[in-house]
Image (cartoon, rainbow, N blue to C red):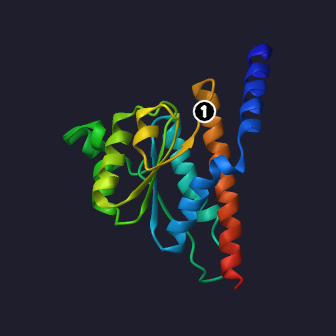
Amino acid sequence: MTDRVSAHLRNLGGQIAALTSADIEPLTSAVEAAWAADRTVFVAGNGGSAATASHFATDLSKTAAPKAPGARGIRAVALTDNIGLLTAWANDHSFEHVFAEQLRNLARCDDLFIAISTSGESPNLLAAVSAAGECGVQSLALAPPASTLGRRAGILVPIEGESVQISEDLHHIVCHAVTARMADVLANAASR
């Protein structure tokens, strides 16, 4: 058991060391641009990536929020969090449409959609990227570069771990780095 834990930590450490701020910059820039234009950031994923999407939306909305009274924060929504709506779309139509239909209903032109996936092959995320395009919403993916999602999203932050767990760990690290940067951006804006 200790060997497995040590191997995971070694592998993760190597993958973290290979990440650079330049790798993450497209996501940071997209979130900052959405905030500057008073747009909404939508986030989605499946399984562990659904939990990451929820966590990231929470961090953008709360952790990055400026401390000054009345200062404008980031409007972020995890499309994974409304279980009633998710199950209604899945039951009445198909699970493939659970994110796409929410985007069609909620998103406005120039909003931002972030898809988080360890495989980059989830039909519901691919459908959401297509719906985003139809709505004039910018799409960004944290996904393997050779994946279908990686190729279809407008912007890619390439994440490909040696295992699903490593990929999920890297997603969290990237999202936390972006949250830290956005906390600085919002604090600086509030102090002007």
Residue placed furthest toward the bottom: 192
Q: How many marks?
A: 1
Q: Is residue 102 visible?
A: no
Residue, x 57% and y 54% (percent of image)?
27
Residue corresponding to mark 1: 167
Quarter of the picture containing the N terminus is top right
Q: Is residue 95 left or right of residue 156?
A: left
Q: Position of residue 120 (x, y in %)?
A: 45, 34
Q: Position of residue 61 (x, y in %)?
A: 56, 64
Q: Is residue 69 left or right of residue 135?
A: right
Q: Is residue 75 left or right of residue 159?
A: left
In depth, the one of 131 and 183 nearer the eye is: 131
Q: Is residue 173 visible?
A: yes
Quarter of the picture containing the C terminus is bottom right
Q: Name the secondary structure under disc 1.
A: helix
Residue, x 52% and y 35% (percent of image)?
145
Q: Position of residue 135 (x, y in %)?
A: 30, 59
Q: Amino acid at mark 1?
A: Ser
Rendered image quadrant of residue 162: top right
Residue, x 57% and y 72% (percent of image)?
73
Rendered image quadrant of residue 31: bottom right
Residue, x 23% and y 38% (percent of image)?
91
Vertical comparison of 46 with 11: above or below: below
